[in-house]
Image: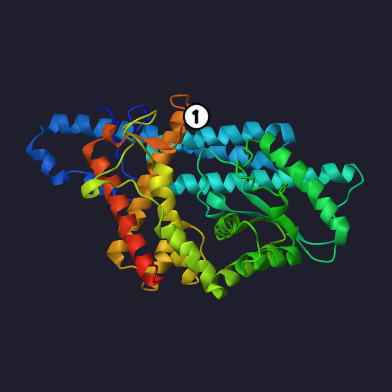
Amino acid sequence: MRRMSRHVPATVEPAAARHPGAGGGERDVLGALPDPRRIGRYCTADEIGRFLRSISALLDEDRRRMVAWRAEGDRLMHGIAAAGQSELKDIHEALNRIEVERFLLLFSVASLHRNCTHYRDELAKRAMTGVAEELESRGRPVPPVPFALVSMGSDGREEQTLITDQDYLIVYGDGGGEEADSYFLDYSTLLVDRLEEAGFKRCTGGIMPTNLTWRGSLAQWRKRLLAIVRYEVDDYGKNMMDLIVLSDARHVAGDRSIAQELIGLIRGMERDYFQVLWGMARAATEMRLALGFMKRLWTEGSGEHKGEFNLKLLAWAPLVMNIRILAINQGVPATNTVERIAFLEKEGSFSAEMAQGLREAYYILTKYRILMQINVIKGIQSDSHYLNPYRLPAEEHEKIRRAIVGIEELQKIIHTNFSIM
């Protein structure tokens, strides 16, 4: 008996795919199996015996692999705390390799999110400790103010995948004056370097604490945020995008209370200044989707990506963005997209049917984002965003199309709720 290798881009060959659904609790795999009571109608006793032995061997093989991954992962995680700076990248790459193999077996988006987010948090904490030690050895002790590292983007939503960059800010307590400002500039500069050495790419959008926009005392952050929500800034569009990014802020390391104070400040301003949230909602509803005539999937008609579409920009990002807007408006505390959907269903923004459709949309779109990342890691393709839906099995093609239709319906809900003309 051979495992199937369907339901993935043609260039990806999973190690195993007993059931190529979302996996990890996102779908009931037993629902795809035939009724075992009917097998006897088509097989002899000897054939049933061989079938059971084959199934048992395959399951045992998978179990041994999962146990080995868990043991290796635990060993690597335990080594982070004592690792030197030069060792962190090797640990990071080894943990990523485990997640690639595990995903190709289980197709569990939730499991990959959870594991990648957890070990990158631990790697970031170790890098922070090393930076503080390095500065202290130069005669620069940490100022007597609390400080914290806060993540945003996919990391802030606890939705880390296999390819990551740095989406961090630093907040520190008031009262440190110029001495604290100078210290945290040096600290941030060194931290960004050390994270890059550990395998965290620099953010191309500059969302790193080396950028003054993403570093400051709590009072400086308050002043900065008020300037945005009161329209006191020159480049309002950029600052609005910064506020959207801040909506997913999550404490990673350092003093939790000051991080939570900043996060509470962000959420409060977004709710209190409705015009700002309205502007975010308008931007969300205007995000283009990969839908064409008769709600068929739209793809590029010419050029390098002919027959493909940008899965991130034209499907996944609009879903995450529109869910975020509703969550902020309803005061949902969660940052994770699936958790936000659950909260919104519970408080009545979504019917059970729509909530389930949005969860399935998130899992199918993210599954293919991860599979394309694996292709990039393996050197099969150079871009992790463009997908050719016509190379997929018809069932998977239709799942993606339905997912995007569901996002369009979500945009209509926000358009109505915010009275966007």
Residue placed furthest toward the left: 41
Q: Position of residue 332 (x, y in %)?
A: 49, 69
Q: Residue at x 84, y 52 (%)?
A: 182
Query: In the rendered view, would you say 305 is above or below 227?
Result: above
- Neighbor class of circle 1 (other Cα within 10 Å; few <14, some 14-19, many 20+) is some
Choose between 77 and 289: the one closer to the eye.
Answer: 289
Q: Quadrant of residue 12?
A: top left
Q: Please determine whether, in this image, residue 19 is positioned above or below residue 249.
A: above
Residue visible at 52% across and 32% down in the picture: 97
**Hey, what amino acid is under mark 1?**
Ile
**Against 37, is 272 above or below?**
below
Q: Position of 255 compared to 203: left or right? A: right
Please indicate, yes or no, whether residue 95 appears anywhere in the rendered image.
yes
Q: From the image, which quarter does the C terminus lie in?
A: bottom left
The x, y position of residue 50, in whole percent, is: 21, 29
Residue on which disc 1 sits:
377
Q: Is residue 290 left or right of residue 95?
A: left
Q: Quadrant of the N terminus?
A: top left
**Residue 55 versus residue 275 in the image, above or below:** above
Farthest residue in the front direction?
Answer: 234
**Residue lying furthest right:** 139
